[in-house]
Amino acid sequence: MRRIVLILFVMVACMVSCSRRERHIPAMREAERIAATNPDGALALLKDIEARDLNEDSLRALYYLVTAAAHKGKESSMVSDSMVRFSFEYYKERDRDRYVRSADLYALHLFWSGDGKGALALLDSVLELPDIAGSLTLQLLESRIGVGGALYDCKNNIRHIKRMLEMAGDPASVMEYKGQLCENYQFAGYGDSALAVINEMIDYASRNHLGEDQFTFAYEKIGILEELGRYAESNALADYLMVHAPQNSAMPYLHYWKALNYFNMGDFGRSSIHLALADSCAAGRDESEYNYYKGFTRPLHEFLDYRKHGTVSISQLATFNNAQRDIMNRMESTRLESEQNALKQENRALALKAQNERKTAVIIIVALAAIIIAICALWNAQKRKRMTMEAEERAEALRKMVDEMSRPAGKNDSREALRRAMLQQLGIIKMVAETPTEQNRDMLRKISSIGTDTRGALVDWSSVYEIIDNLYAGFYSRLHSAHGQLLSEKEEQIVALMVAGFSTKEISVITSQTAATIYVRKSSIRKKLGVPEKEDIVAFLRSDASI
């Protein structure tokens, strides 16, 4: 019974473990497929999975990889994705594609954690690997350019962007990469190269009637011309765009560029006029956009004030610096608050999951307990049923023997007379008397004239053996002499009763054993004496020359 319960428990535990594993694998694979295009959906698929529940390294590596990929797709902080390093190390010698993707994600984690140089070194080393799929190479290059741009590593970015241009397969991607190339040329100090690229972009937008893009590229050209010292051209282009600016959204910045150009040309009067016009156009905009605008114009205001008054106001500089610092502090505070909220949500999710797991464990325990109770109840019911059936069979056999003893003996049937005498010697009366049920009392009344003395034993076997020897020419003595060392006392008793013609049920009553036990002992007798399976034991023994 204990073995059955243990097997059931192991089976249920294995089923729960396997069902979780089989449920997690399709969810993680689907999340991996959609992480870049639908990161929220990918995270939703992963929300019911806890890394500590994943016992296999392959599943844990995939979980960390997909989680980090979803965070990248959301363009959110990747500070918490430190475990993607496990994926990076796991896939290094196992799966080239996943190794490259995990390297990209681990590099982004390093960047978000403040190790920008480490991120660039990792990306550059992976980009040198041979036989990387084109799509993965583009992902690495895009990450490299993004990190490199943030760290002002623009000169090294240029060669990577040119590699992207070689791999670009559609005009939209070409224009996107040219825009990045132009920006990096500009910040790297290659103004002429930046101007050549922006002219190509303007011509492309003009040919394809992309009015909004053409305006954007022309606006970028104003800054490039200004940095090249071509102020008149920059002002002329700014005048053109003021007429064609969509809804005047760029008007403050167009005036600002003109103010900056005039300042560099030494025309401080016109510079002040256009700076005032720029401030007027920017008035009324929302706070964040206005603060962004002021970040550009405040230094020019200070320079013009110095030209006008010949002094520098430290309070004005302090106001500017404090404003910038407050903006940065608010941004950092917002970032930290967002991360703390994310951690709180994750902790709440973990707590809820733990609670659900406890409930699941309780349900499993209750289910196991119910199964065990049901099995025990069924086993007890079967046992009681079997015992009842055996008791009924024993009672029936006993009743038949008692009835046989109650019938008058035949005149010429010596065998019947001897059997009756043997039944008396077997202690049937005492057996009935020792179980004082109403049925047995009725039997006692029927055979009240029969009596025997077994000296406390259920059966007086010495008398039985003597009767067997008298009936069957010393059968028991010859059996004991030939096979006494092989057969146990119980087995000798069974053989003696079988020779006397008692049935299995009757033998079970006489020997106070169950019918099943009698069958088992008969099998043992067959093995010990070498009786063939289909041959009768008594017939075999009668033919045995040693008996």
Image (tube, grey):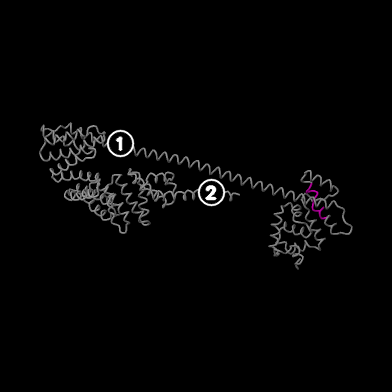
Q: Position of residue 545 (x, y in %)?
A: 76, 68
Quadrant where the C terminus is found in the figure = bottom right
Q: In this view, does 171 lie above or below 278?
A: below
Location of residue 42 in the rendering, given as x and y in whole percent from the top left corner: 39, 46
Horizontal side of residue 315 vs 367, given as left or right: left
Give the vertical position of 461 relative to 114 (above or below).
Answer: below
Magenta stretch: includes residue 430? yes
Q: Where is residue 100 in the image (x, y as percent from the top left)?
A: 33, 54
Three-letter code for the amino acid on which mark 1 is drawn: Ser
First in sequence: mark 1 vs mark 2: 2
Which residue is labeled 1 in the image?
333
Q: Quadrant of residue 290?
A: top left
- In the displayed structure, does residue 274 sit left or right of residue 419? left
Q: Are marks 1 and 2 in contact (CB under 8 Å)?
A: no
Specify start and end residues of the magenta stretch as a single range: 421-432
Which residue of the protein is positioned furthest toward the bottom in this rendering?
Answer: 545
Identity of the residue drawn at 75% across and 52% down: 509
Residue 474 placement (x, y as % from top left):
80, 63
Badge 2 density bin: few <14, some 14–19, many ≥20, Cα 10 Å? some
Q: Nearer the viewer, residue 42 or 6?
A: 42
The disc label shown at residue 12, or none: 2
**Label 1: which secondary element:** helix
- Residue 146 appears left or right of 269: right
Name the residue type under label 2: Val
Q: Distance between the residues labelled 1 and 2?
A: 49 Å
Disc 2 is placed on an element classified as helix
Q: Which residue appears farthest toward the right when viewing the image?
A: 411
Please state the total of marks drawn on the protein image.
2
